[in-house]
Image (tube, rainbow, N blue to C red):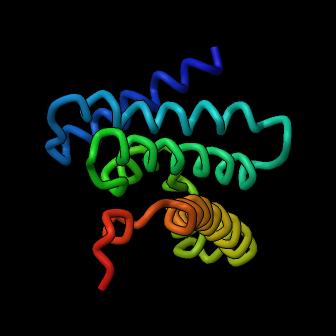
Amino acid sequence: MEYMQVLYAFFACLGGCLIFNVRGKELFLMPLGGAVGWFVYLLAAPFGNDIFQNFAGTVVLSIYAELMARLRRKPATGYLLVALFPLVPGGGIYYTMEYCIAGNTDLFLETGLHTLGVAGVLALGVLLVSSVVRMFGRSPGLADGNRR
């Protein structure tokens, strides 16, 4: 029953696609990245805490986004933006602000630092995959012999 969450993640990302007015095959392929990322998040549960789970999910969905960007000749940003929806720590942000307003400093700091850690590993996972792709990917201008 826990893996029904993958289907829910797909539909949540599909809603994001509708908000961003995505059309064509991307209406299926972009939410698929979110489902893949959430599936890896669930698979990584035995190997660590939720920060590691978020990192693993983000790395895999970033690889998916880069792959789809190359295959579909579209920007990877669209695939990433939609696919990251399930992993974004919205609840953590909400509770951090709730604890801040209520004056509960200990829970505010604890929740805030955890939320910052999750957001940081999301950015780190995207940055890592993007950097590796840029480092080892071929440059279109130089591959054609058009040197400047």
Residue 115 visible in the current orientation: no
Decide if residue 13 is on the left or right side of residue 132.
left
Decide if residue 13 is on the left or right side of residue 37.
left
Q: Specify the farthest residue to the bottom.
A: 148
- Determine which quarter of the picture holds residue 60: top right
Question: Residue at (34%, 32%) from the top-left corner?
Answer: 29
The percent position of residue 148, horizontal first and vertical second, equals 30, 86
Residue 34 visible in the current orientation: yes
Q: 107 and 68: which one is in front?
A: 68
Question: Residue at (65%, 20%) from the top-left corner?
Answer: 2
Question: Residue at (57%, 59%) from the top-left corner?
Answer: 129
133 in relation to 116, above or below: above
Q: Specify the farthest residue to the front.
A: 145
Q: 148 and 1: which one is in front?
A: 148
Quadrant showing the N terminus: top right
54 in relation to 4, above or below: below
Decide if residue 135 is on the left or right side of residue 27.
right
